[in-house]
Image: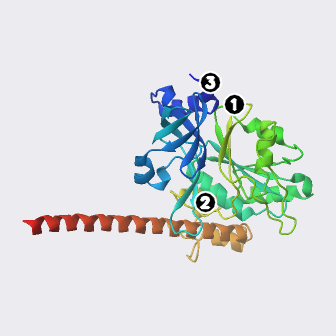
């Protein structure tokens, strides 16, 4: 087996896929730039482009993404991407400003690190949103609270997160000062693929540099004027770490709309509310105004945070709205197909 492809996780992926491929016709997408790609192959990293079939016929979600394994047709020092191999996980969000379109962040991911700064970037509601998206994708979430050197009360923030999202791993670090980096490195398993997500200025690129042991990503200071991060990473990029694991750095995001495939992801994130709901009088209780609701009772008795409940209701409503819109889109597509078939049938009868 070629060592270059193994370095980027082929052996692990092939064990899952259980398929046979010509090693010289395989690649993994390292970066995406519109319709141009950097592809890791058995002979190194080369430039790749998609075929007309993929470019014009495929759904946008089926186009190659960072982390994808693909079948290629090499020529000279470039290649043509002819097929995207099946994905075992896909991390996506609802595209900003759109009703139902998904924006894929990365694919074939085992675990994710949500990087959030302990400065003005800290937002527990955003953490709940991202953990929910990861649960939906079947990707194990880990929370990294960066810039621990800037504040004194980080234990309070950790306690807040643990109270809201009790089943998620949390680590306080300082990527700039190399504090806690060994703990993060110990979480990384060879051949597994990880992704970093978070806002601009949260410290993702600094963390990548610390884990790599060299500066592979540019970094900038947070804007003092507005307390917001400056974009340094503008594309998703895949790196092979010294310990044999693979990690994807991503551009900063502040808005993370939910595009869930299953409402179960919300129940998994808000496990306390999910447990309470088992005591509700109605099996289909919405936890809004039904009598005998154990969730509302817990709020009234001070056993459940109103803020956590509000976040749960908001995400649940957002997910249901997205799901309904997607179903509406599918129905419109079916209606259009039916109309086209009827028109063809009518034209045929009319001709004769």
Circle nearer the N terminus (2, 1): 1
Under tag 3, what secondary structure? helix
Q: Is residue 126 left or right of residue 43?
A: right
**Residue drawn at 87 percent across, 43 percent down:** 178
Say which of marks 3 and 2 sits in front: 3
Asked where in the image residue 260 lies, by quadrant, the reply is: bottom right
Rendered position, 65 above or below 308: above
Residue 272 visible (yes or no) = no
Q: Nearer the viewer, residue 42 or 306?
A: 42
Label 2 with label 1: CB-CB less than 8 Å: no
Image quadrant where residue 220 sits: bottom right
Disc number placed over residue 3 in the picture, else none? 3
Q: Secondary structure at mark 2?
A: helix
Residue with the most extreme front position? 76
- Residue 244's label in the rendered image is 1
* Residue lying furthest left: 352
How far apart marks 1 and 3 lie (CA) works out to: 11 Å
Nearer mark to the viewer, of 2 and 1: 1
Number of labels in the image equals: 3
Q: Is residue 75 above or below residue 65?
A: above
Per the image, the residue denoted by label 2 is 274
Quarter of the C terminus within the rendering: bottom left
Look at the picture and state if 28 lies above or below 32: above
Which residue lies at the image location 80% right of the left edge and 47% below the top edge? 206
């Amino acid at each position: 087996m070629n060592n270059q492809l193994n370095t980027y996780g082929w052996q692990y992926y092939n064990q899952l896929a259980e398929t046979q491929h010509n090693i010289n016709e395989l690649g993994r997408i390292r970066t995406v730039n519109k319709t141009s790609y950097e592809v890791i192959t058995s002979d190194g990293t080369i430039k790749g482009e998609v075929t007309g079939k993929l470019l014009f016929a495929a759904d946008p979600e089926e186009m190659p993404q960072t982390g994808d394994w693909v079948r290629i047709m090499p020529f000279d020092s470039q290649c043509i991407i002819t097929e995207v191999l099946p994905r075992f996980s896909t991390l996506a969000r609802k595209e900003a400003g759109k009703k139902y379109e998904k924006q894929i962040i990365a694919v074939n991911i085992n675990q994710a690190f949500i990087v959030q700064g302990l400065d003005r970037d800290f937002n527990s509601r955003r953490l709940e949103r991202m953990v929910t998206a990861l649960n939906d994708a079947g990707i194990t979430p880990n929370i990294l609270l960066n810039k621990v050197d800037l504040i004194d009360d980080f234990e309070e923030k950790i306690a807040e997160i643990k109270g809201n999202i009790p089943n998620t791993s949390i680590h306080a670090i300082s990527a700039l000062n190399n504090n806690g980096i060994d703990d993060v490195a110990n979480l990384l398993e060879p051949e597994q693929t990880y992704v970093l997500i978070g806002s601009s200025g949260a410290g993702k690129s600094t963390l990548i540099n610390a884990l790599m042991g060299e500066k592979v990503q540019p970094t900038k200071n947070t804007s003092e004027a507005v307390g917001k991060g400056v974009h340094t990473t503008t594309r998703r990029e895949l790196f092979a770490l010294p310990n044999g694991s693979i990690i994807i750095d991503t551009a900063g995001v502040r808005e993370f709309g939910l595009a869930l495939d299953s409402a179960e992801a919300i129940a998994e994130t808000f496990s306390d509310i999910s447990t309470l709901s088992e005591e509700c009088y109605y099996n289909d209780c919405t936890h809004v105004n039904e009598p005998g609701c154990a969730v509302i009772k817990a709020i009234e008795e001070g056993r459940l945070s109103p803020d956590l409940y509000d976040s749960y209701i908001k995400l649940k409503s957002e997910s249901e709205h997205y799901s309904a819109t997607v179903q509406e889109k599918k129905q419109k597509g079916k209606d259009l197909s039916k109309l086209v078939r009827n028109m063809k049938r009518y034209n045929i009868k009319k001709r004769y």
